Image: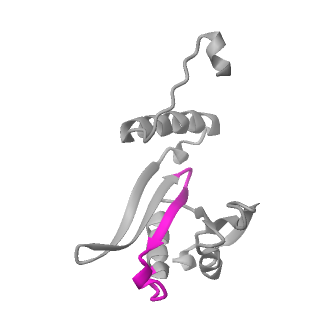
Amino acid sequence: MELDHIGYQIERIKNPSESLQEDLWNKLHEFSVSKLGDKSLESKEFFAILVKEGETLIAASLCYLFFKGLNLQLLWVTESKRGQDLGTKLLKEIEREAQRLGATLVFGYSFGFQAPKFYTKLGYEEVGKIPNYPEGQNCYFLCKKLTMEST
């Protein structure tokens, strides 16, 4: 590797531990907040919202709040429950939680074969796109500014 010749060692870690991931995110966040100069942007939180039927997981989301924005990393609904408004209800709950935590927007992405139209029909705006990724599809970046009426 190119960096080897100047005395650095490069290591690839498969499935990095939760503590390593947390440490790296904390380092980046600390640096970023120092550059932004706004103490109100220090708050951050990684969380999941789960929907269960008995003990069975039927829908879920992973969310990361930082800089007063909520990164919706994933929203999933089990196949047998799709088309029953469960995704909409979960997304509304995510938006309420985002506002409770002080977020002013929610952002994330969806592939063309997933649900970009689901988000746009619920007030999300397409703010970017990677065409032909994966091949034959598009990756859409979506954002919704939160207001009192949006939840």
Q: What percent of the width, then of the height, locates residue 73? A: 52, 59
Establish if 151 lies above or below 13.
below
Q: Is residue 65 magenta?
A: no
Q: Is residue 107 above or below residue 5?
A: below
Q: How many marks?
A: 0
What residue do we see at 64% from left, 66% from top? 143
Q: Quadrant of residue 120?
A: bottom right
The reply, left or right, for residue 2 in relation to residue 114 is: right
Measuring from the top left, give residue 119's x and y in whole percent.
Answer: 60, 75
Give the residue at x 46% y 83%. Answer: 82
How far from the left and from the top, in percent, is residue 141? 67, 63
Span highlighted in magenta in the image: 66-86
Q: How is the image coloured?
A: one colour
Question: Who's the residue at 42% across and 38% down the image?
Answer: 16
> Which corner quadrant holds the N terminus?
top right
* In-front residue for pair 126/65: 126
Residue 68 belongs to magenta span? yes
Can you give x and y, in whole percent of width and height, for residue 47 in the image?
40, 57
Which residue is situated farthest in the left direction here? 54
**Residue furthest front as drawn:** 135
Residue at the limit of the structure toward the bottom, as seen here: 84
Q: Quadrant of residue 21?
A: top left
The residue closer to the viewer here, 112 or 32, is 112
Q: Which residue is nearer to you in this view: 2 or 93? A: 2
Up-down: is 51 above or below 15?
A: below
